[in-house]
Image (cartoon, rainbow, N blue to C red):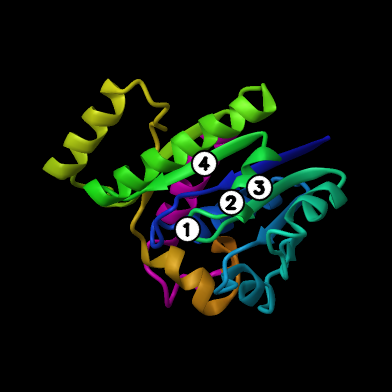
Amino acid sequence: MKQVIVIANRKGGTSKSTLTQVMAQVLAKGGKEVTIIDADPNKPQVRWKKGTSDLDIKVVGDVDEDNIVSTINGIKSGYVLVDLEGVGSLLTSRAIMKSNLVIIPVQASALDTTEAGKTVRLIQKEEEILERAIPYKIILTRTNPAIRSKIEKKILDDLNELNLPVLKNQLNERSAFKSIFVDRVSLYELDRTKVNGVEKAIQNAENVTNEIFGE
């Protein structure tokens, strides 16, 4: 069985690639079959794959609006995580049309939530075309695990008032999440003598992933 999870926000810098990678790592660590489709022009997932991680995560690059559908169709099983570019495009629309779930990462800023709203409206347009529901969830990213800021609280209140599906867990700002792209290994393989807070980052990643996939 295949599940296609698209990570989308029309705004760049919302931690789409980080969220994609940590979800993939948690799933792979749990023995799941995982493929990342790297549709970000900067190719962060392709570069990560050139590292030394022992986790079995497949990465597919060289995708565009012409081949994104056939690329997704060509993967027959497992979890397929699509890391999209930070713009609204035909590629984004086509990926969303093929998805079982869309995850919308949002930083605690008015601009991020505005762009997230545009992504929600894009999903709704695709639902009309397909005549089926496309489930989606919103997650706050790059948050402080110790202190909830006033603007973060305000944004959460606004999202909840709109009855949007917001995850309880947030992807925190942690040095370990940056280190996985620098060292090109998984969270589980980071050198704890050189990177602070690895265990807390792992717990954060697992909490987020388990909530998304209901485990």
| N-term mark: 3 or 1 | 1
Q: Toward which corner of the image does residue 91 lie, by quadrant?
A: bottom right
Q: CA distance from mark 3 to mark 4?
A: 12 Å
Q: Which residue is mark 1?
A: 87
In the rendered structure, which segment of residues is drawn in magenta? 190-215
Which residue matches tag 3?
95
Query: At 45% from the left edge and 63% from the top edge, which residue is drawn?
Result: 177
The correct choice, above or below, for 130 with respect to 143 in the image is above
Type of amino acid under label 2: Thr
User: Badges 2 and 3: C-beta atoms under 8 Å apart?
Assistant: yes
Mark 1: few, some, or many residues within 10 Å (few <14, many ≥20)? some
4 and 2 marks in contact (CB < 8 Å): no
Q: Are marks 2 and 1 in contact (CB under 8 Å)?
A: yes
| Distance from the alpha carbon under mark 2 to that under mark 3 | 5 Å
User: Is residue 1 located in the magenta-colored stretch of the structure?
Assistant: no
Residue type pointed to by label 1: Val
Determine whether, in the image, residue 127 is placed left or right of residue 176. Answer: right
**Is residue 186 visible to us here?**
yes
Q: Residue at x 30, y 24 (%)?
A: 160
Query: Residue 92, which numbered label?
Result: 2
Q: Residue 138 vs residue 99: left or right? A: left
How many labels, in total? 4
